[in-house]
Image: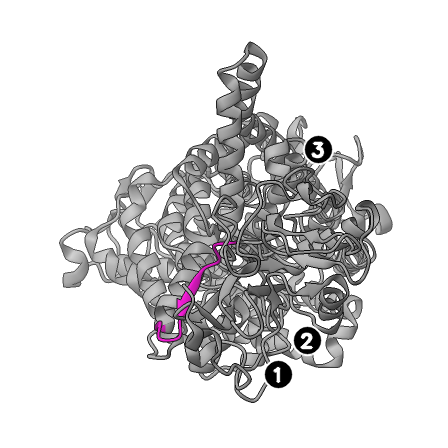
Amino acid sequence: MDNEGFCNDDYHNLSSDDELVDISDVTMDFNEDVPPLDRDYSTGHCKADWRLNNSPKLLDILDDTIPGIGTYEDFNTIDWVREKSKDRDRHREITNKSKQSTLALLVSISDAFSGWLLMLLIGLMSGALAGGIDIAAHWMTDLKEGVCLNGFWFNHEDCCWTSNETTFKERDRCPQWKSWAELMVGVNEGASAYVVSYFMYVCWALLFAFLAVTLVRAFAPYACGSGIPEIKTILSGFIIRGYLGKWTLIIKTITLVLAVSSGLSLGKEGPLVHVACCCANILCHFFTKYRRNEAKRREVLSAASAVGVSVAFGAPIGGVLFSLEEVSYYFPLKTLWRSFFAALVAAFTLRSINPFGNSRLVLFYVEFHTPWHFLELIPFIFLGIFGGLWGAFFIRANIAWCRLRKNTCLGHYPVLEVLLVTLITALLSFPNEYSRMSGSQLISELFNDCSLLDSSRICDYSGSRTGSANVTVTNGLANRPAGPKLYTAMLLLVLALVFKMFITVATFGMKVPSGLFIPSMAVGAIAGRLLGVGMEQLAVYHHEWNVFRAWCSPGADCITPGLYAMVGAAACLGGVTRMTVSLVVIMFELTGGLEYIVPLMAAAMTSKWVADALGREGIYEAHIRLNGYPFLEAKEEFRHKTLATDVMRPRRSGPPLSVLTQSGMTVEEVERLIIDTTYSGFPVVISHQCQRLVGFVLRRDLVISLENARRHQEGVVSVSAVLFSECDLPASPNTPPAVKLHSILDLSPFTVTVHTPMEIVVDIFRKLGLRQCLVTQNGRMLGIITKKDVLKHMAQMANRDPDSILFN
């Protein structure tokens, strides 16, 4: 073990960096029963009990755990390995005690059941909040158009539900519901009524948007946006204090209703994932094993992500797959079961509240009368191509807009920006009925399969066409040449498509809660409906073409435009988010269209291939990179032939590596090192001459331990020795007592050699969730690689700015 040549090597040409472990700092605390490495190095022996030295009792954290040890500061990365090790030790202790008494057995059963109880509470709380948000958003959206005289708290549908004076053709009109034009000018039609309705619509939209952005700025800045990029980062191990707190939950719930009701091109589905995770984080504080263990808490947050999608779309299975495919970083089998249970409870709770009033869990129930033909896969694939192109365009345009917002004075005026975008949205959307209605209503309208009784403008078909001798009826529907209102509707849909494509770019990322699912689906649904109607009219007027002759006979209803809208919605959502499996499951749960899985799969895969060809990142990964979050994307491959020595700190031109010695430093010297550096951890070596690695200690644990020693340990002064070993130094009777910190030392940090390929290092960081690993050569400490160093190196290799990894 004693290698004189090794210990005496010159170390002065090595260097360090001032950003060594500034944000991402972890330690690997596998086992504290490892024999000390300093045996026979200093005194030649280790005493069984150092108190035989007649000195005062030293601080030993194993005897009395100090509050704060093992916790993490804000904007730091957790140590997955240490947290899992702590949980295994806790579980092992409970299991051993359960064999000793009945009370301990009950405690063990309670501990095992607590996870399922927590899932039940998360499902109930999230389902109740989602139901309340749906009801409130529906009412406030209708409030922009009028008010119910029977009670202002009734929305339009509920107000007219019990009325006996409605007709089937005008079932949305009843005497109990009064528009603002009727209340102010006494008429419901004409120029004056239109101007009043227009004015009130814009005023209500501005009021709702102003309240939303003001509440977010004043009480919970973290309540803005979708929340999914930050949730992904948190699930990967990053800590953002307050992002899942009670104020964020309260403000996001309120402002989500206001933002959706304002008419902005956004949805509530993404923010509901954030709301569900807030519920989970708050409820975790009532269960000790989740409150004290960050890794266990992230298992709960993964299940909560599934709950958020379950209550957003009424898709519990799709929610579980969404959590697994899109957001979760660590997803064991146990979490899969609990996610499924929590999503089931949340869906049941939402169904019991019945916010849609249709006794169904699905948001857009469809019932198409005509099966699809395999030749229709061609237009479905074209919709997939459109979805991929739209997704790539949207991501680039939105990131460019958000970067402009961050780097210019636009970002200093979030209230003005929200009001300006709201004003433009309201002014341009009101004249067009398809852009004026909410996103959910629009998608439901576009998914609709027209029947003979439909009075909608997009269902205006003539009973016969010129040149047709006979009209054949199939399933109650005649052959369907387009009527004049349908052509008008198609023109309005084209205008709505262009409007939504551009206004959504500016809306997503503003300082209000904003989801992307519904706007993306709306764009795809419009494009799909337009293509579906075009295909339908081709089949009607050119049924003699070879492509239609085999399966589309004259007078038959063989093309379903609503199906094209559904496929287009899936394609555009897939192009933006790059989801595949979970997207298809969400779509058929969302619509109830189980037999249309193949068209959905074809469109989803095509959109992903096209979008990936134009850019590898989905919208959430792009926003993670824009914000500089320390997230190692599992989908991103590292193919460069660099080594650990190319990335490690210190650099040759930088200051030397800051280290602690095992037994040669005083309290004053350690405190001075802490003050002079900003590192979040320090390697511990045998001595400055012999840089043999002993372990790694976290800055936070070191600070807390020294402060506690000065406060509670008798006789500790600045010249007291600091020991990171169980061995004692020879001391005279007048020597002040030493501070023994062996228990906070990680004796088994992850290490690599200087010749380890960086692709292996990246895989280690990605799969084990490391904060840092140490670089050694023959046991000698040479440098350190942090998660931030890995991310900067990957950015540099990809010709991106490495300083974009800001962690702010």
Instruction: State the residue at coordinates (63%, 55%).
Output: 239
Residue 769, percent from left and from top: 48, 56
Nearest the eye: 368 or 781? 781
The way the protein has been coloured in the rendering is: one colour
Label located before the other in sequence (2 or 3): 3
Q: Which quarter of the figure is the C terminus placed in? A: bottom right
What residue is pinned by disc 3?
Answer: 159
Work out whether residue 636 or residue 709 is closer to the camera in this orientation and state it: 709
Residue 782 lies within the magenta run: no
Dot 1 amino acid type: Pro
Residue 29 horizontal/vertical position (percent): 52, 50
Return the disc, 3 or 1, that comes first in the chain's sequence: 3
Q: Which image quadrant is residue 352 in?
A: top right
User: Pointer 1: what residue?
Assistant: 655
Which element carries disc 1, helix, strand or loop? Answer: loop
First-in-chain label (2 vs 1): 2
The residue under label 2 is 405
